[in-house]
Structures are given as structure tokens and as C-alpha cells.
Amino acid sequence: MRLCFRILLLVVTALWYGGSSRAQTFVDIKPSPQQIEWQDLEFGVLIHFSTNTFLDREWGDGSADPAVFNPTQFDPEQWMRAIRAAGAKYVVLVAKHHDGFCLWPTAQTDYSVRASLWKNGKGDVVGDVARAARKYGLKFGIYLSPWDRHEPRYKDAADYDRYYNAELEELVQNYGDLVEFWLDGAGSAGHVYNFPKIIETLRTYQPNTIVFADTGLFEYGDARWVGNEAGRVPYENWNVIDRHGYLRWRPVEADTPLRAGHWFWHPNDEASLKSVDELLTTWDETVGHGAQLMLGLAPDRRGLLPDSDVARLAEFGRAQRERYAHNLALKHAPVAADVSAALDGDPDTFWSAPAGSHHSTLEVRFNKAVTFDRALTMEWLNGGQRIEKYAIDVWTGSAWETVASAHAIGHEKIDIFPAVTASRVRLNILSSTDGAAVREFQLYDVQVSRRTMSR
């Protein structure tokens, strides 16, 4: 009887974590439709705005008087215009940071905008930001800090978990579809939260929301933290991760603030504003390494994004659009219809190598030689991340010469190299677990774009 029970337990465990024993290989793990849609967004922003804004703080201790929260020109539509100009597709608002101050009129505590002077306690930052985001075509999500340095119930784990869950229920029921829910792992002072209940509540009302969480919250997250706040992916980026022998599809989100080292607004802080070149490099090292870019923005005490931030976001958006405005691969010579699906500038179409193949090539020919210094490749991930090693080669007239090579491609890979001129280029897939599938293979001469922008 005991032996039978143990066998049954092993079977149930295998089904719970992977669907079948065969699914416990990296090759067979595939993303959900929600994860695919989220990864296509590529670029979002994380907004910090609270009592810290008015007290020149990064980390509040929960003792701030709610009366200090009183923006004089609060205008989330101004935020959204700047965010859209930068090219972002979604917005995550910090509805409650670690100090416990709530930006919506929650019924769970008096420590919220209801106790502030702003709008005589009748305001709702979360509601206003959600409406503004959607008005400007941006998806909306929330960050609700589990750590709460103000709430007295935090000392009682079970009591606080009920409190947190009640806050979450308000947010997930009253502010429309949420694209992402942030579970920040900072602080917590040894408190172990009731994560199963948190996710159960979220999924009841928001079944399609992507949960961002540290890798350690393996069972509960849909996306994972990159491991730094520098906005870069410093490793070969595979979407599937291993946790104690179990595997899950957990794409990376790389967060970094627009102002170096500062998530909240601070006075006399202009020197921290990142340059356009820094932001472009951040893009290359996040989105260009198959991750999401999450850029931190901070409205000031007026309730507006500072003018310099607005200008920088617009500059960044223009520079980014100019960089990728001229895809040279669109000028390719006639090719087979299936190959053209990877060269058409449309990520909804894709080229497939023969089923079961482990090596394949996708060649682009031009009627006359073109000069380029980077390639952008997108893998079709619905069937899993298959490409394990690849090279980008150019034909010298007598042989193929490799200008870039790596292992993972994933959602998107940007390869940068010294400018080359060639009439034949190929994506050489040296190893794949099955027939490779490529949504886009694009070529750019960014040096030309830079010269054009500088005129």
C-alpha cells in the first residue's frame, strides 16, 4: 500500500509541474498565449509617485503624514503623452510602495489618498492613471508592495495576508484589465506571504495578467527579474528556467530608472538624467537580448513629469525610430515565398526550416551590395525556443565570413558588429532542437542613421 501511494504521489507531482514526464525538458516548454502577447510589447514603464516624492526619499518608513501628498498640477495625461512618444506600450503604476501609502481610496486603511489634502481626500491616482493610459493606447498594470512598513498588522503574518489580499481584491476588480502585476521581493523582514492566495485572487478576476516576480517565486511568476537594476541582460537569455529540477517559461523583464539610481523624483537632480546614448545602449542590452525593457519614471511634486524627462523621452523615441526606420532586408532580391515571410517586416509571419531539422540557413540576396552594421532577428516562440547556436555570415566573393555568432535568439536578438558590405547575407542556424522558425531577419546601417540625425 505504501509503495502504491508513493508511486501515485510521483505521478501527481509530475503532472502538476510539467503536464507529463516528457515535458520536463527545456525543448518542450512553451509560452502561454498571454506570455507571447506580453513579450511582443517589449517596452514598458514603471511609475513611482507617492509621499516619498514630497519628502526627498527613496525608501519611506511608513511614518510620513498623508497630508504631504498634495500635487498641485496632477496630470497623468501629460505622463502618457511622454510615455507614448518614447515608444513604450504599457504602464505599471506603483499603487503602494513599501511605506504602505495607498494611491487609491482603499477601504482597508486610512493611510491613503483619502487622508491627503489632494482633492480634499476625494482623489484616486490609480483610477486617473488607468484611464489616462488607456486613452493614449497604453496597457495598464499595478505594483502592490507586499512589504508594508506602516500597517500595524504586518507583525501578524496571517492577519496581514488577509489585509493585503483585501487590497488586492479592490485593485483587480475596480480598474479594468491589468497587463502586469508586480510582486516586488524587497524588504519583508522575514515575512513569508501567502503567495498561493495572492495568485488565486489575482487569477479569479484577472486571468490574463502577467505576474512579475523574482525567480525564487517559481510557482507564481510568469516573468522574472533580470537580476540587476542597470537595464541589461548580461547572459545568454533562455526563456525557460530550472527550479529544483522543474521547468517553466519565465521571460526576463529588465528594470532601470530614467534617472540613474533614483526611482522617485528628487530636487536638484538633473545630473542623474540618462543620455539618449545611454538609453539606446540600454535598449540594445535588454530588448536586443530578448528581454522586456521596464524604464522607471518619476513625476515631481507638481504631479507632472519634469520637462527635462519629457524632452529626453521624446528624444529617445525619435532616435530609436530613426535607428530602425530603414530595414535593408526589405530590399532583398526575389526569394521563395516561405523565406520572404522572415524578410517582410511583419512579425506576424515567419519562415520555418524543415520539420525535424537541426541545421538550416536563411539567405538574403541583394541586386547590389549593401552596407550594414547590425542585424535584428526574431524567433517564433509559440513552439518553444528552438535555436541553440547561430551565426550571421556574409559572402566575400569566395567564402562565407562570420560577422556575429551566439547561442540564444529568443524573442529578439540585436547583433552589432563593424560595418560590412555584401550582396549575400545568411542567418546560419548551426544547431536547433527542431526545425527553426524565424519571424524576422532584418539588417540596418545604424552609422548612417546617426549621421543623418546629427545634421
Image: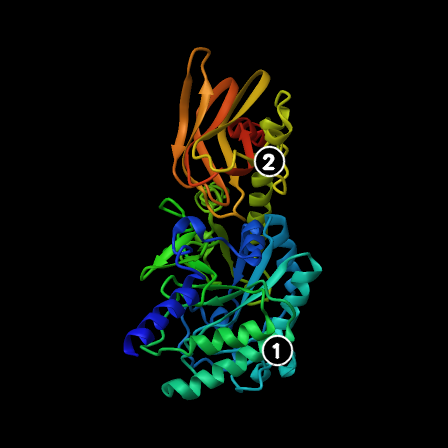
Amino acid type at circle 1 is Trp
- Horizontal side, residue 135 vs residue 125: left or right: right
Residue 232 visible in this rendered orientation of the protein: no
- In the image, residue 47 sits, relative to residue 231, either above or below, namely below
Numbered disc in front, either 2 or 1:
2
Looking at the rendered structure, the secondary structure element under dot 1 is helix
Separation of disc 2 and disc 1 at Cα? Answer: 41 Å
Image quadrant in which the C terminus is located: top right
* Disc 2 crowd, CA 10 A, few/some/many (<14, 14-19, 20+): some
Q: Amino acid at mark 2?
A: Glu
Percent position (x, y) of residue 337?
64, 29
Quarter holding the N terminus is bottom left
Label 2: which secondary element = helix
Q: Nearer the viewer, residue 313 or 384?
A: 384
Residue at 39% from the left image edge and 32% from the top image edge: 405
Q: Does the rendering let one see residue 388?
A: yes
Q: Residue furthest top?
A: 398
47, 353: nearer the viewer: 353
Rendered image quadrant of residue 174:
bottom right
**332 up-or-down from 146: above or below:** above
Q: Report which residue position mark 1 lands on.
A: 118
Q: Is residue 454 above or below residue 281?
A: above
Residue 9: % across, % down: 35, 72
Please tell me which of labels 2 and 1 falls first in the chain. Answer: 1
Q: Residue at x 45, y 62 (%)?
A: 19
Identify the residue under disc 2. Answer: 322
Query: How did the renderer colour the structure?
Result: rainbow
Residue at 63% of width from left, 43% of height from top? 348
- Location of residue 437 in the rendering, given as x and y in whole percent from the top left corner: 53, 39
What is the total number of numbered labels drawn onto the structure image?
A: 2
Residue ranking furthest to the right: 135
Q: Position of residue 365 (x, y in %)?
A: 56, 20
